Amino acid sequence: MAEKLFPNVNWDRMWEATVETLYMSAISVVATFILGAILGLLLFLTSKGNIWENRPVNLVLSAVVNIFRSIPFIILIVLLIPFTKFIVGSMIGENAALPALIIGSAPFYARMVEIGLREIDKGVIEAAKSMGARTTTIIWKVLLPESMPALVSGITVTAIALVSYTAMAGVIGAGGLGNLAYMEGFQRSRNDVTLMATIIILIIVFLIQFVGDFYTRKLDKR
């Protein structure tokens, strides 16, 4: 049945491309979660009225985040070519897409982290400070646990965006389903290849959304 509906699909190559997409997505999501959480925490802590209030530092961090968050991903890939070649040694392959994926998505997630932290009741933070809690204790015992539903919801949205970014990166040789859909599907007028790649990407997105929603509901104690 599958052979009749998708006569031009090389299933071994399709599986290989799927693994490449999952690899790029997984590595970039983990790195984005770590870097974005750090950036978001710094944005929150250095903002007005918070523990490390520092307007110049906050302005610089905000500017960096806004700049990288605003650059269209396909342009960011081109701008990062020298950096990518220096780090990875090539512009071809799934590893070559990782710097642009991480740098493009971490600032986006950082803003979501900052928003999540701002939703925490100020009274909880003040209570921890009044009991003599150190900054590291407040971060690990108050800020992160209280904002965890928002952090998980935010990384879910970011992970879905990253899957679409991998497809764009594939068009310029990064591998994955985007590359397969463009090179084997679009350029050779094999619509069934493009359709199958699209279906698999949709399945990945739906799974990410399902898992993200499940854990968000589980962590939300309200």
Image: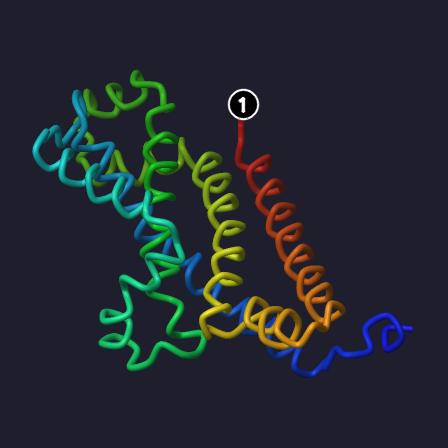
- Judged from the image, the secondary structure of the residue bearing numbered disc 1 is loop
The residue at the far top in this view is 123
Q: At x 60% / y 51%, what residue is drawn?
A: 208
Q: Is residue 181 left or right of residue 120?
A: right
Q: Is residue 85 left or right of residue 19?
A: left
Locate the N terminus and report the quarter of the image it occupies.
bottom right
Q: Position of residue 185 (x, y in %)?
A: 66, 72
Q: Is residue 61 above or below residue 203?
A: above
Residue type marked 1 = Arg
Q: At x 34% / y 53%, what residue is drawn?
A: 34
Q: Position of residue 136 (x, y in %)?
A: 21, 41
Q: Is residue 213 left or right of residue 173?
A: right
Q: Position of residue 217 (x, y in %)?
A: 59, 35
In this rendered view, identify the residue nearer to me: 83 or 143: 83
Q: At x 21% / y 44%, what residue is drawn?
A: 64
Q: Is residue 3 above or below residue 167?
A: below
Classify mark 1: residues with Cα within 10 Å, few (<14), some (14-19) or many (20+): few
Q: Return the residue at label 1.
A: 222
Q: Is residue 60 above or below residue 196?
A: above
Locate the C terminus and report the quarter of the image it occupies.
top right
Q: At x 40% / y 68%, what residue is drawn?
A: 97
